[in-house]
Amino acid sequence: MNNSVERDGSLTPRQQLRVFATAVNDLGPVHLPRDLVDKARDFAPQVIHSLLGGVRAMKIASEMAERLDLPVVPHFMDDWVENLFNQGQLGGYARRTVEREFERVLSHSPILLTIGDRMRAEFEDRLHRPAVVVGNSVDFSEFDRVRRESGHRGTTPRTLRYVGGLHLGRDQVVRSLARRLVEINAGENWMVELNVPPADAALAESLSSENVNVHYGGSLRPDEVQHALASADALLFIESTAPGVARFTRLSVSTKVPQYLGAARPVLVLGPADQSSVQVLVGAGLGYHVESPEGKELPRAITALGAATQAEDLPAGARSDSVISTFGLASTRERLREALATAAETRRLV
């Protein structure tokens, strides 16, 4: 249960109890054993790099920073800052604690890391700190090698491959898409291929058994992902339209996006247009966007997607300087190294 995602609709008593319990657990006191602090001191770190994301993690990061006189470099993957405990949990005490502990973290943070460029710009303005984009990254030259060797099938039915988890309601989106493909007479032309983590295998198997145009292809090892993506006729990307989830992920760039960019296959993109992940894929010329499978634009998008699978040349944006710089492995590593070095040096000068 994510404390940063607002629940839609009324909650059952059991759900209300879980919301209360997770809030109390995250707000509880934190104690750092002396031997843990001593071990950290012996390790002689230069910075504390943390994803944070909760009150307990913020307390630990701040406490360690104060004990060891170190800077904290927060690494933001989602906008939990604005959304954590914002539903009045514990009479508003939970949100006030978030704000107090976040200010404490910021007092130790000379620089921030964000997962995408929109988040960088907004967080710099909101938090008055310099921010650097450090998200998931790929080796584009290696992806291009795999693309040349694998090639997409180009047979009927075409493969529309989804790689990732089915959490945050994505299973419902797949179910809706499968039904809509049949309704628009595209059900026999496309096979939705699911490659999901083992934890979502039961959901994927259920979707496959319910829909003739959905196939569960099992889980992938990390070394199998590149070939699976590059060999698909097209890829499927899903962002939730649930208001609470959408507010949480609005500035995020999904860790799948760089991999989809690397594969450079056409992508059916489902989700709100204001989501950063959606904008990156569409901006690269790979994404064919429809907010929901129920939308009237789906037939047009599927037709365009089918035509794009036959294209020989990549869209110019798929290998633009911006894409390579933002999501390339070497450039991302260098930005991370420089940001951490800047934080360490800034702390020494204080």
Image (cartoon, grey):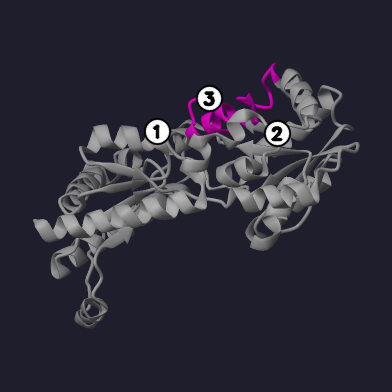
Residue type of the residue flagged with mark 2: Pro
User: Which residue is the extreme one toward the bottom?
Assistant: 35
Q: Residues within 10 Å of mark 1 (few under 14, many from 20)?
A: some
Q: Position of residue 199 (x, y in %)?
A: 63, 59
Which of these two is toward me, 260 or 332?
A: 332
Q: Which residue is mark 2?
A: 266
Q: Measuring from the top left, give residue 291's x and y in whole percent.
A: 60, 25
- Residue 160, quarter of picture: top right
Instruction: Please tell me the numbered disc located at residue 118.
Output: 1
Task: Say whether residue 24 is visible.
Answer: no
Q: Earlier in the sequence, mark 2 or mark 1?
A: 1
First along the sequence among labels 3 and 2: 2
Residue at the (66%, 29%) spot, across then down: 315
Instruction: Confirm or deny contact between disc 3 and disc 2 (CB under 8 A).
Output: no
**Residue at the spot of label 3:** 273
Tally of numbered discs: 3
The label nearer to you, 3 versus 2, is 2
* Residue 176 in the image: above or below residue 184: below
Between disc 3 and disc 1, whose residue precedes?
1
Cα distance, mark 2 to mark 1? 23 Å
Q: Nearer the viewer, mark 3 or mark 1?
A: 1
Q: Which residues are magenta?
A: 270-297
Give the residue at x 10% y 57%.
349
Kind of residue sitting beneath label 3: Ala
CA separation, marks 3 and 1?
14 Å
